[in-house]
Image (cartoon, rainbow, N blue to C red):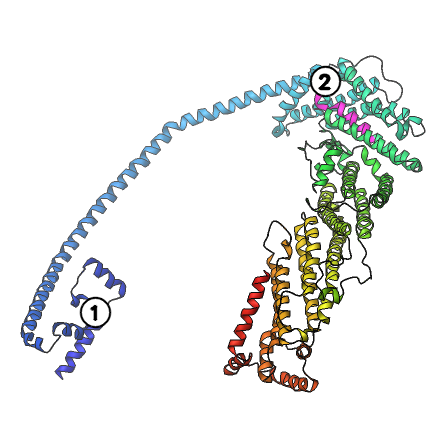
Amino acid sequence: MMEEEELEFVEELEAVLQLTPDVQLAIEQVFPSQDPLDRADFNAVEYINTLFPTEQSLANIDEVVNKIRLKIRRLDDNIRTVVRGQTNVGQDGRQALEEAQKAIQQLFGKIKDIKDKAEKSEQMVKEITRDIKQLDHAKRHLTTSITTLNHLHMLAGGVDSLEAMTRRRQYGEVANLLQGVMNVLEHFHKYMGIPQIRQLSERVKAAQTELGQQILADFEEAFPSQGTKRPGGPSNVLRDACLVANILDPRIKQEIIKKFIKQHLSEYLVLFQENQDVAWLDKIDRRYAWIKRQLVDYEEKYGRMFPREWYMTERIAVEFCHITRTELAKIMRTRAKEIEVKLLLFAIQRTTNFEGFLAKRFSGCTLADGALRKLESPPPSTNPFLEDEPTPEMEEMAVEKGDLDQPKKPKAPDNPFHGIVSKCFEPHLYVYIESQDKNLGELIDRFVADFKAQGPPKPNTDEGGAVLPSCADLFVYYKKCMVQCSQLSTGEPMIALTTIFQKYLREYAWKILSGNLPKTTSSSGGLTISSLLKEKEGSEAAKFTLEELCLICSILSTAEYCLATTQQLEEKLKEKVDVSLTERINLTGEMDTFSTVISSSIQLLVQDLDAACDPALTAMSKMQWQNVEHVGDQSPYVTSVILHIKQNVPIIRDNLASTRKYFTQFCIKFANSFIPKFITHLFKCKPISMVGAEQLLLDTHSLKMVLLDLPSIGSQVVRKAPASYTKIVVKGMTRAEMILKVVMAPHEPSVVFVDNYIKLLTDCNTETFQKILDMKGLKRSEQSSMLELFRQRLPTPPSGPEGSSSLSLLAPTPEQESSRIRKLEKLIKKRL
C-alpha cells in the first residue's frame, strides 16, 4: 500500500510540474545548467546507469546515496529561504502601492487647480477684448459702407457718361469707361433687390444694346453689302468701335467679322463664277494669286483697324478656302468628263502648295471656330509639307535595301490647313487611280519584254543570286504612288490604290517570276547501266543547264525580296491611311503568292537534282548483286550520285548565299525525296548475296556521309550542317543500313531471324518483311512459313534469354562477325 501511494504521489507531482516547451526554453535561457537532474526529459533509469555502469560500481552505493540526500537537503533549504523572502516582499509591495495611490491623488488635485485657474484667466481675457471686438466690427462695416457708396457714385456717374459718349460716338472713351462700369456693376449683384441698383443695371444693359446696334450701323455704312467699298482708308472711329465690340456681346464681334469678310470676298465670287474661263482647274493659280494680293491689300489698308487678336487676315484666308472648296467641287461635278489626270494632279499640287503657304503664314487658331471641324485631319506622317520628298536615287537605295522607311527625316509640326481646299478633289481621285492602274499595267508589260530581250541573269558564284532589277523598279514606283496618294487623300482612294497594288503584285509574281521558271521536260536522259558498271568518269548533265539553275535561284531570291518588301509596304500603307480603314489593308494573299513562288523554285531545284540521280539508282537496282564476289571500293552508281551532287549543290548554294534559310530548305527537301527513293530502289535489288549486301552497306554508308556533308560540299568554308537536316539524313540512312543488316543475317533459325527483324527495323508492316525475304532470295514456300511466323511474333516481341540467344545466333560465329566488321571499317577508312 505504501508503494502504491508513493507512485500516485510521483505521478501527481509529474503532472503538476509538466511545463510547456516555451516555458521550459525560457527557464533554460535564464538559468543555464549542465546538471542532468535539471533537464526536462530527465530519465531516472539512464541517470542510475550512468552512476553505476558496472556491478563493481555498486560497492559505492552508500556514498552516492549520501551525496544525493545532501543535495536534497540543500535544495530544501534554498526553497525554504526563497519562500520566506517572498512573504516579506508581498508586504513591501502593498506598502509601495499605497504610497503610489496617495501620490496620484495629490497630482490629480494639482491638475484640477491649474484647470480652474485657466478658466478664470480665459474669462478675464474675454471681458477685456469684448469692447475691442465691437470696435473691429464697427470699423469693418464702416469701411464696407464707404466702399459701396464710392462704387455707387462711380456707377451712377459712369452710366451717365456712357450714355452721353454713346450719343457722341466717342468709342475710344467708351471702351475704357464701359469696362470699368462692368467691373463696378459686378460688386452690386447681391444688391439687385434695391430698386435704384436694379435701375442702374438696366440702364447699363440698354447702353450696351444701343452701342451694339450703333456700331453695326456704322460698319454697314462704311462697308455696304452692295456697291463698292469706300475709297478712303479706315477711320479711327471704326478702330475704336472694334475695341468696344470686344467688350460687348461676342455676337456683335462675330457679326462685324462676318459682314466685313463677306464684303471683302464679294469680288472673288464675281471674278471666278462657274461660267468664267478662269474658274477651271488649269487656271487655279489665279485664284490663289488673287487672295494673296487681297491679303496684302488688307494689311495695308485695314491692318490697324481691327485688333490683332481678331486674326482678321487668317479669317479672310480661311473663308476664302471654304468658298474655293465649295466652288471647285461644284464646277468639277459639272465638268467631270473634262478632268484628266495631269490636270487633276496639277490642280492638287498647286492647292497643296497654297495650303503649305497658309501653314507657314498663319497659326490656324481660327479654324476651331468654323466648319473645318468637319474635315478629318490626316495622320502626321501623310502631311506633304512636313516631310520632304526623297529623291529618286534615295528611293532606289531604300528599296534595294528592302526598307521602305528609308530615308527618313524629322517630322515637323502638323499642318492645320491640310485638306481645307484639297478635300474637294477626293471624289475625283478615281481618275488618278485609273491612271496608276494603266501605268502599272504598262510597267509589268515592259518588265516582261525586257526579260525576254535580256534573257536570264548571268551565273553568279561570288555574291549569291541576283535580285531581278525589275523588282526594285516596281517597289520604287509603288513608293512614289503611295506617297503621292497619301498627300491627296488618306481615305477611300488609298484603299483603291492598295487594291491596284495587290493586283500588280500578283501579276508580277505570275508573269515575271512563275512565268519564267524553267519547265521540266519529259525526256529521260541519264546514265546507262553499262556505263555505270564500267565506272566512266563522265556523265550526262542534269536536266537544267547552269543558266537555268541560276535563273531559278535568282527568281527565288527575288520572290524572297518581294515577300519581305510587301510586308513593309503593308505596314506603311496602314500608317498612311486613316485609322478607321487600317483593317481593310491586307496583303497576306500577295505574300502567300510569293511564298508559293519560293516553294515552287525550291521544288524545281530538288526535282532537277533528284532526276539526275534517278539513272544511277535505276542502275543500282538492276545490278546482279548475287554475283558480287568481293567487297571493293564504292560502286559506280554511288560515284555518279556524288558527281551530280557536286555539280549542282555548289551552284545552288553560291546563288542562294543571301537566302541561307531557303538553301537549308532545299537540302531538307532533297533529303526527304532522295532517301525514300533510295530505299525503294534498295528493295528492288534482289536477290542479294552476303558479299553483295556488304557492298551495298558500304555504298549506303558512303552516300550517308555525302548527304551529311551536302550543305557545305565543294565549299572552302566548312560549316556545320543544321541539326534538323542532320536528323533527317541520319534517321533515313540508318533505316537503309538496318535493312541491309537484316538481309545479311541468316534466316535460320526462323524465329531468331524474325525477332531480329522486329528489333532492328521496328516495322510491323508485312509488305516490308516480304520485300526483305525477296531480297534474300527465299522461295515462296519458305516465305509463307516466315510470314506466318512473323505475324505470330508481332504481339510478343522477343525479350530476356530469347532475345540474347537471338543476338548470339544472328551470325554464324563471333569471329566471323568481327572479321566482317573490321573489313568494312578498313574499306570505309580507305575511302574517306
From what the image shows, is residue 771 above or below residue 551? below
| Residue sitting at x 80%, y 63% | 524
Q: For mark 1, what is the residue?
A: 17
Of residues 431 and 807, the one drawn nearer to the viewer in this rendering = 807
Q: Is residue 342 left or right of residue 733?
A: right
Q: Residue at x 70, y 54 (%)?
A: 647
Q: Which residue is mark 2?
A: 163
The residue lying furthest to the top in this view is: 232
Of the 4 image quadrants, the one containing the C terminus is: bottom right
Choose the circle earlier in sequence order: 2 or 1. Answer: 1
* Quarter of image, res 746: bottom right
Mark 2 vs mark 1, CA separation in Å: 110 Å
- Residue 357's place in the image compared with 582, above or below, is above
Q: Which residues are magenta?
A: 308-322
On residue 407, the disc is none
Residue type beneath disc 2: Glu
Q: Is residue 264 visible?
A: no
Vertical position of residue 582 compared to residue 751: above or below: above
Which of the 4 quarters of the picture holds residue 688?
A: bottom right
Horizontal and vertical percent position of residue 748: 59, 84
Closer to us: 730 or 459: 459
User: Where does the image place residue 28, in percent across and percent down from the top left?
Assistant: 21, 61
Tell me: 688 left or right of 96: right
Look at the numbered disc 2 and give the secondary structure of its residue: helix
